[in-house]
Amino acid sequence: MDLIRDLAALRERISLIRNQGKEIGFVPTMGFLHEGHLSLIETAKAQNTFVVVSIFVNPLQFGAGEDYEDYPRDLENDSRLAAVAGCDLVFYPVARDFYPSGYGTFVEVQGSITDRLCGASRPGHFRGVTTVLAKLFNLVEPHRTYFGQKDAQQCLVVKKMLEDLNYNVEFIIMPTVREPDGLAMSSRNKYLTPLQRKAAPVLYQSLQKANSLIDNGERDGKLIKELLECNIKTVPGAEIDYIQVVDVKKLEPLSQLAGTCLIALAVKFGTTRLIDNIIVEV
Ligand code: AMP
């Protein structure tokens, strides 16, 4: 497996790979890899002849006071895990090469899909995400790219950017990989204290309760939100950022559930912000 940091070296390698007629599967990450990331890499390996994983903690998508400096980093372990999962090339640029002094171009998807949910709680976050991904897609020139359903809103936003900017990249969404107790895997789970870690599965448990309520015929969006809120508030230290019951295309709040609905939430345990979601068909 290749490890490349330099942008020009990456371009050279990608051009060689494409000239050999290989199909490139690309998994962008911020590193500190876990089984969620590995499931994306394994699927990319199964569907492509060359797999690129990027590891880059992108300063642009962190707000002031967020965890950019503290975000966990472990390139050595990540490279080992990525190689085992089938990665052929890890690209790990440094921030000063990606955003040199005088850098001034940004990619922003506008509208309700970036304004709501995480977009409302983290202004500028999705602009940072789409800017870094536009650059990464230009450099890696993938045939297919793989994202996780855990970040449901990110999937919507990136898909929209790919369509709007005419990228010729197939966009593949993979299911959320969870710990045995249901907690969605996340690099940020590492921040949780033992007590917070014990409480955190309440997120998925609440989503599952909402799901069974809907299975039993409940369609009232407000009532479902209230159920989630009550459940999450039963655990000590959980501070709700948002709970939303929305349509899956525009993220408009639903008073009555219909069609494909997204139930998404963000909850803070101390300074650690966790997100999770389910999709329900009614
Ligand atoms: P991150 O390193 O957190 O930016 O995530 C990189 C990619 O991995 C994104 O497409 C995430 O949606 C995906 N991902 C993160 N956690 C999970 C998970 N638990 N299950 C599936 N995909 C995930």
Image (cartoon, rainbow, N blue to C red):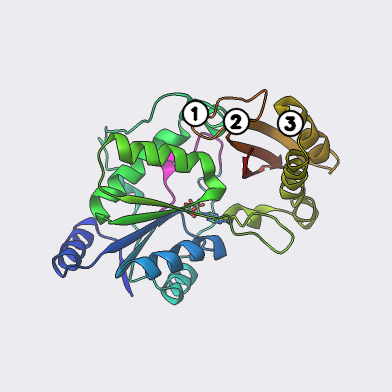
Kindly identify the amino acid type of the residue bearing the numbered disc 1.
Answer: Lys
Q: Is residue 63 above or below residue 194?
A: above
Which circle's residue, 3 or 2, is located before the other in the chain? 3
* Mark 3, residue position: 225
Estimate the x, y position of residue 270 in percent, counting from the top left. 72, 42
* Mark 1, residue position: 250
Q: In this view, does 194 lie above or below 206?
A: below
Residue appearing at x 47%, y 35% in the figure: 125
Estimate the x, y position of residue 88 in percent, counting from the top left. 33, 71
* Mark 2, residue position: 246
Kindly identify the amino acid type of the residue bearing the numbered disc 2.
Answer: Val
Kindly identify the amino acid type of the residue bearing the numbered disc 3.
Answer: Lys
Q: In this view, does 269 lie above or below 117?
A: below
Residue appearing at x 31%, y 38% in the figure: 163
Residue appearing at x 50%, y 45% in the figure: 68
Q: Quadrant of residue 50?
A: bottom left
Label 3 neighbourhood size at 10 Å, few (<14), some (14-19), many (20+)?
some
Tag 1 near tag 2, CB within 8 Å: yes
Instruction: For mark 1, give the secondary structure.
Output: loop
> Is residue 169 in view?
yes
Which is nearer the eye, 39 or 223? 223
What whole-number distance in Å separates the C-alpha atoms at marks 3 and 2?
Answer: 11 Å
Q: Which secondary structure type mostly characterizes the magenta part of the structure?
A: loop
Which circle's residue, 3 or 1, is located before the other in the chain? 3
> Is residue 97 in view?
no
